[in-house]
Image (spheres, coloured by chain):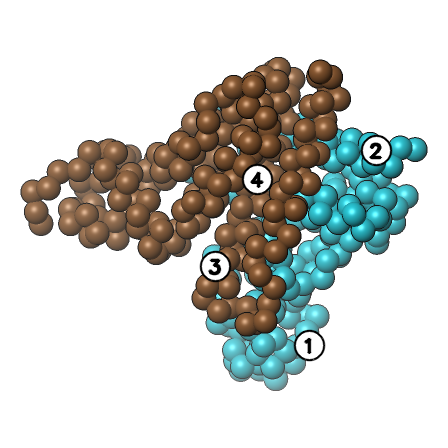
Chain colours: A brown, B cyan
Amino acid sequence: MTSVRYDRQSIIDRTLGLLDDVGLPDLSMRRLATELDVQPSALYWHFESKQELLGAVADRILLTVPDPDDRTPLMRTATAVRDALLAYRDGAEVVLSTYALRLGARRAQDALLASLGGEPEDADAADAIFEFILGHAMLLQQRMHAHSIGAVAADAADPTAQAEAIFTAGIRAFEAVSGLRHPS
Amino acid sequence: MTSVRYDRQSIIDRTLGLLDDVGLPDLSMRRLATELDVQPSALYWHFESKQELLGAVADRILLTVPDPDDRTPLMRTATAVRDALLAYRDGAEVVLSTYALRLGARRAQDALLASLGGEPEDADAADAIFEFILGHAMLLQQRMHAHSIGAVAADAADPTAQAEAIFTAGIRAFEAVSGLRHPS
């Protein structure tokens, strides 16, 4: 054991790095402690539970989503959310699990709602868009992972085939509804 | 070991029962074989791999989705898909994993496309709706599971709170787009 000390931020950074290396199923507090060369108790000094740590990791993953602004087009905000989820291995699953426990900030939903116009009556639509992006990104990450480990036939279609078109079709639908409610 | 023989259908049935009992993370071919009181090789005689078996289970889960019919309103088809996923523990995750590997039938997507009008140019929108329902149902199942094992505070909101309103908002958006393209 070394005397290196870690603060919350550096633990979050190293957790993201380990997530990219081993994936969510193999990411344990014990493994993370070994990686940091500290006792597991050092982690629990900063985070009460693995779930709380993953909530902080989810917030970090979504940090690249632009601040809520009703001048940002929905497609741009939605694309930023998708790209944030795809930037780290199992990113969509980490964020979905966190959202399931109602942990973590609502940065993505707030930005999506602002792009819809920011009216409270569009809050359900903003959540629906977020759930669409989560489903889309989880599917894409599982498909890319299956390809990377050779779990599908070598002549299988490109894992990202059609993904852009499907994503665009989904977001366009929500754009249309917003346009109907708030004609410009 | 008994001399009971199982055919494909009865193995699928028993897999669904075991899925409901133990959940997807603990569903292994070994455990299933023990449950059926056969050697694992008996399972591999019917299914080449666990993935192929899960593909058949996914098809079974979606069997309650109505046959593709352009007279079935989108909301009814989408609700049937959602209810099918929610009918079994981890149902959404089983179907998402199968779809990620491009295994299983496209029963849900075909029914959704028919309800959009059945035009080939709406295929991406039908896939987007399916991805929205998968994301929505996965989130809901994770949230319900967390509540059932006490992983959230006792005073936490009802896990299904807002779920119906968010689902409706999502499907209404796709109805609107379909109406715009095919005015009646």
Which amino acid type is marked by label 3?
A: His
Calculate the distance from the C-alpha at mark 3 to the C-alpha at mark 1.
32 Å
Chain ID for label 2? B
In the rendered image, the vertical position of residue A131 relative to residue B107, given as above or below: above
Do residues under tags 4 and 3 come within 8 Å of each other at their CB atoms?
A: no
Q: Quadrant of residue B5?
A: bottom right
Q: Is residue B122 left or right of residue B23?
A: right
Name the residue furthest right: B184
Q: Nearer the viewer, mark 1 or mark 4?
A: 4
Chain ID for label 1? B
Which amino acid type is marked by label 1?
A: Asp
Q: Secondary structure at mark 1?
A: loop
**Residue tagged 2:** B179
Q: Secondary structure at mark 3?
A: helix
Q: Is residue B111 left or right of residue A124?
A: right
**Residue tagged 1:** B7
Q: Residue at x 43, y 27 (%)?
A: A105
Residue A129 horizontal/vertical position (percent): 61, 33
**Residue tagged 4:** A133
Q: Residue at x 56, y 51 (%)?
A: A139
Give the number of the disc on residue A145: 3
Mark 4 residue crowding within 10 angstroms, few (<14) / some (14–19) / many (20+): many
Do residues under tags 2 and 4 come within 8 Å of each other at their CB atoms?
A: no
Residue A175 horizontal/vertical position (percent): 68, 29
Q: Is residue A163 left or right of residue A105?
A: right
